[in-house]
Amino acid sequence: MDTTELFVPEINAMIEHAHFESSHVSNDSYLKLKEVYKIFSCIKPGENDENRHTWFEISRGPISAFGDYDEYKESGEVETFEEFEQLWKDYYPEETTWYRFDTAKYQNELFFHLDGKLIASIREDEPPAKDPAFDSDYLDRFADWLLRKVVSETGKLKKDEAAYNRYIQQNLSWSKRFGRIKRKDYWEVQGDEAIRPDKDLSDESIDKLKIVVEKTKNHDILLAEKMAAGEFFRICEICYDANGYFKNSQVQLTPKEKYLQMADGRDGGLRELTEESPLAFHIL
């Protein structure tokens, strides 16, 4: 297997577990990530934080990228190679998977996201002062792969912008496409299967809702008199839990730990604050 290439199982592992900050980055990876950002800057940025994005189509690769047959057999997950091969195809039925790649800049920090997950962040003008805090071979391999991938993709874009965008338009997985439509149009698409709460509302209920709306207009919105970082994390946790983001988590996470997993790092130092201090939050 080509050790310089990364395939879908490895990319998924990176997205699931990785978040490399400046202290984790070797000088080699730092320079490659800076080069990635520089090359990728040929793409027109969005409105916020110089955000840029494109799509990578990644191969699932050979079965060896999925795992080692002997290890799976020893663990009892499979008994034959045929079962191992079927397990691989059950996990990765498609030959390729699409991933959205983003870069962003906030103040002097550069951010690199893959499929919405912050993979790495570095300070633009502060190369590592010493060796990384842990073995960074995996990040070094990822940074090398990412640089080659960005060079390849931007090369295709510069050669024929229309063809590049057309290929994405025609081949991007439908599961990766998002947009908004009017609720009325959605109900029409659903037909008889649509859940229509509006049809179940009585005239009395509608009148009550109108009263609630009018009363809301005549009252000021209640604001929290003070806020601390810990309370902010707790409010974020309420939203995360309401959407079931951590329902499958095997460990009990604190509100701050949930925030750190979901946030993209552009918090201006919020994560460093004393959680009980409204003054520290106010000054920030």
Image (tube, helix red, strand yellow):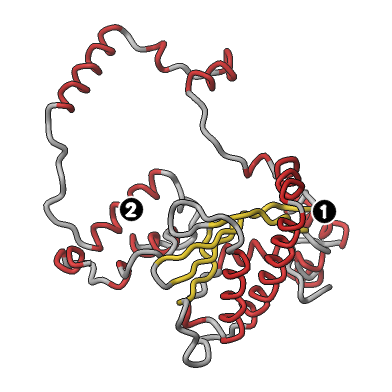
Q: Mark 2 against mark 1, which lies toward the viewer?
A: 2
Q: Report x, y in % for residue 253.
A: 39, 62
Q: Which residue has dot 1 on it? A: 86
Quarter placement of the C terminus? bottom left
Residue at image point 76% right, 64% down: 66
Q: Report x, y in % for residue 118.
A: 51, 64
Q: Residue furthest bottom?
A: 130
**Residue placed most toward the observer, 72 or 225:** 225
Question: Quick check: 188 left or right of 279?
Answer: right
Quarter placement of the N terminus? bottom right
Question: Quick check: 49 left or right of 85?
Answer: left
Quarter of the view holding residue 112: bottom right
Mark 2: amino acid: Cys
Mark 1: amino acid: Gln
Question: Quick check: 233 left or right of 40?
Answer: left
Secondary structure, mark 1, is helix
Which disc number belongs to residue 236? 2
